[in-house]
Image: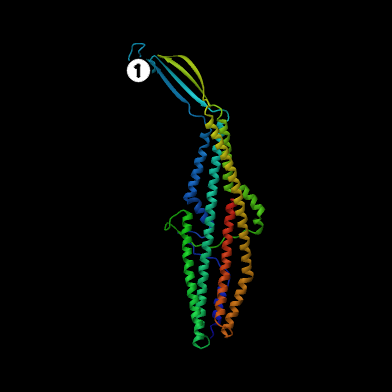
């Protein structure tokens, strides 16, 4: 019986679709899908938790920033040596010449409290936006690492299938060589190609392990603490209608956390600038001072105190500093916006290119490679061609399927970048 049916069956299995990489359910494992990894990272990642605490701390600064300074209390003991009365020194207010109490409160100039509160609120908003930016960046890296890991796992399995195919081809070449129908070079060529593919497979396996370590770090735990499920399937790509550049640009302007941070910095700089100019005016301190003689209060004094803003050079320098800080905040906002829009355009272009590659491979290259392999196998079986066309056809199948999975993985990378830029899921 000729081995051609077995060979054709193996070849067609290798040339089939792209099944997902799956694993049996295990309660000790986490992951398997992007969503489950994101949920775990949101709850456990230390950097994201630190950003949340920093935002909480910034929010707590708003109240104190707008509060009045603490009042001051003072007591003056006059003639505590009792020299005038001929008595002994004493520190009790009722046993000295007289005691004067003073309770004072500093009142900032009109509007200063509000400006300090508004500047602190802008700082709190910036910290909140930084939490979102930290999460969006972390989520993007998790999504991209998941996609890269999935590509490596499938590539490893695809190479394993082709190793099996080359073993079958080598067996056929060995049988034909034994009957004198093929030269020994066919056997050697099959063995050499198989060894090379096994070497590439080992490299891909090592890369997959590296992605596993990277994912553990992104999830916030050290290697050995918990096990990860292998990636099971890639996320679906949104339809073309959801990837309109104009619509995505509007979402970016409304939701991008980096832009929100830059806007909050502008607000904080603006309020700090106004406060610097408001410092030209003095603060006022008012006080009330009763005087005690022995056991009774004999008089009440009212005081008003102002600080004199004489250090004009210092204040002008602070005002210039505030102006330059404002200019820098505006320019950084502009730079952030330009970079975000450029990144969005680049990601959209890359996504479109990857989708076109996927369409080309699935509709043209892969079917043609399958037909070429079948034709080469049939011709080799009948002795019409040598072994080289069979090997080349096998390589074409492998390259086409690798291009397909790489194109799908690249789409996932671009999608994750787009979602980071617009600040939300598509």
Left or right side of 313 for 295: left
Left or right side of 371 for 42: left
Q: How many numbered discs sit on the rendered protein?
A: 1
Q: Position of residue 269 (x, y in %)?
A: 57, 39
User: Quadrant location of the C terminus?
Assistant: bottom right
Q: Position of residue 378 (x, y in %)?
A: 59, 82
Residue drawn at x 46%, y 65% as measured from the top left: 206
The answer to whether one can see residue 359 in this image is yes
Which residue, as the protein is rendered here, is positioned at the far front?
313
Residue drawn at x 60%, y 77% as measured from the top left: 372
Left or right side of 318 for 82: left
Q: Is residue 248 above or below residue 397?
A: above
| Local secondary structure at mark 1 | loop
Which residue, as the protein is rendered here, is positioned at the far top?
85
Instruction: Report the front residue among 253 and 158.
Output: 253
Q: Position of residue 62 (x, y in %)?
A: 53, 36
User: Could you say which quadrant of the image residue 128 lies in?
Assistant: top right
Q: Position of residue 22 (x, y in %)?
A: 52, 65
The answer to whether one can see residue 426 in this image is no
User: Could you say which quadrant of the image residue 417 lies in?
Assistant: bottom right
Residue drawn at x 50%, y 74% as measured from the top left: 163
Q: Is residue 170 above or below residue 401?
A: below
Question: Which class describes the residues within 10 Å of circle 1: few (<14), some (14-19), or many (20+)?
Answer: some
Colour scheme shown: rainbow
Instruction: Report the front residue among 66 and 267.
Output: 267
Instruction: Report the front residue among 412 and 41.
Output: 412
Which residue, as the protein is rendered here, is positioned at the far left?
88
In the rendered image, which residue does mark 1 sit on?
Answer: 90
Q: Is residue 401 above or below residue 270?
A: below
């Amino acid at each position: 019986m000729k081995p051609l049916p077995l060979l054709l069956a193996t070849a067609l299995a290798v040339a089939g679709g792209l099944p997902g990489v799956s694993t049996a359910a295990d309660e000790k494992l986490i992951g398997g899908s992007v969503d489950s990894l994101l949920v775990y990272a949101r709850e456990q990642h230390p950097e994201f938790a630190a950003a949340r605490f920093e935002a909480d701390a910034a929010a707590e600064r708003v109240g104190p920033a707008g509060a009045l300074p603490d009042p001051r209390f003072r007591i003056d003991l006059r003639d505590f040596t009792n020299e005038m009365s001929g008595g002994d020194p004493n520190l009790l207010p009722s046993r000295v010449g007289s005691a004067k109490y003073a309770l004072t409160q500093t009142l900032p100039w009109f509007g200063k409290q509000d400006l300090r509160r508004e500047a602190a609120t802008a700082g709190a908003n910036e910290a909140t936006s930084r939490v979102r930016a930290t999460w969006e960046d972390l989520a993007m890296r998790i999504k991209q690492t998941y996609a890269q890991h999935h590509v490596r796992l499938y590539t490893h399995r695809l190479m394993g299938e082709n190793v099996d195919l080359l073993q079958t081809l080598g067996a056929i070449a060995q049988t034909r060589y034994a009957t004198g129908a093929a030269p020994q070079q066919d056997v050697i060529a099959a063995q050499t190609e198989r060894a090379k593919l096994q070497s590439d497979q080992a490299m891909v396996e090592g890369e997959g392990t590296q992605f596993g370590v990277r994912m553990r770090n992104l999830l916030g735990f050290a290697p050995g603490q918990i096990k990860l499920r292998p990636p099971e399937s890639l996320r679906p790509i949104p339809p073309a209608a959801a990837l309109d550049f104009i619509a995505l640009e509007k979402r970016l302007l409304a939701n991008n956390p980096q832009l929100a941070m830059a806007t909050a910095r502008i607000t904080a700089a603006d309020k700090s600038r106004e406060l610097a100019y408001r410092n030209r005016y003095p603060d006022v301190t008012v006080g009330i001072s009763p005087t005690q003689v022995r056991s009774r209060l004999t008089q009440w004094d009212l005081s008003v105190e102002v600080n004199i803003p004489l250090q004009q050079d210092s204040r002008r320098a602070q005002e210039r500093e505030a102006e330059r800080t404002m200019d820098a905040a505006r320019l950084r906002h502009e730079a952030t916006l330009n970079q975000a829009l450029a990144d969005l355009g680049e990601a959209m272009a890359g996504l479109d290119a990857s989708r076109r590659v996927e369409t080309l491979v699935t509709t043209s290259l892969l079917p043609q490679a399958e037909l070429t392999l079948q034709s080469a196998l049939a011709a080799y079986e009948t002795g019409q061609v040598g072994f080289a066309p069979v090997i080349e056809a096998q390589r074409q199948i492998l390259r086409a399927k690798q291009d397909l999975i790489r194109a799908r993985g690249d789409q996932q990378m671009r999608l994750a970048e787009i979602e980071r830029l617009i600040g939300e899921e598509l």
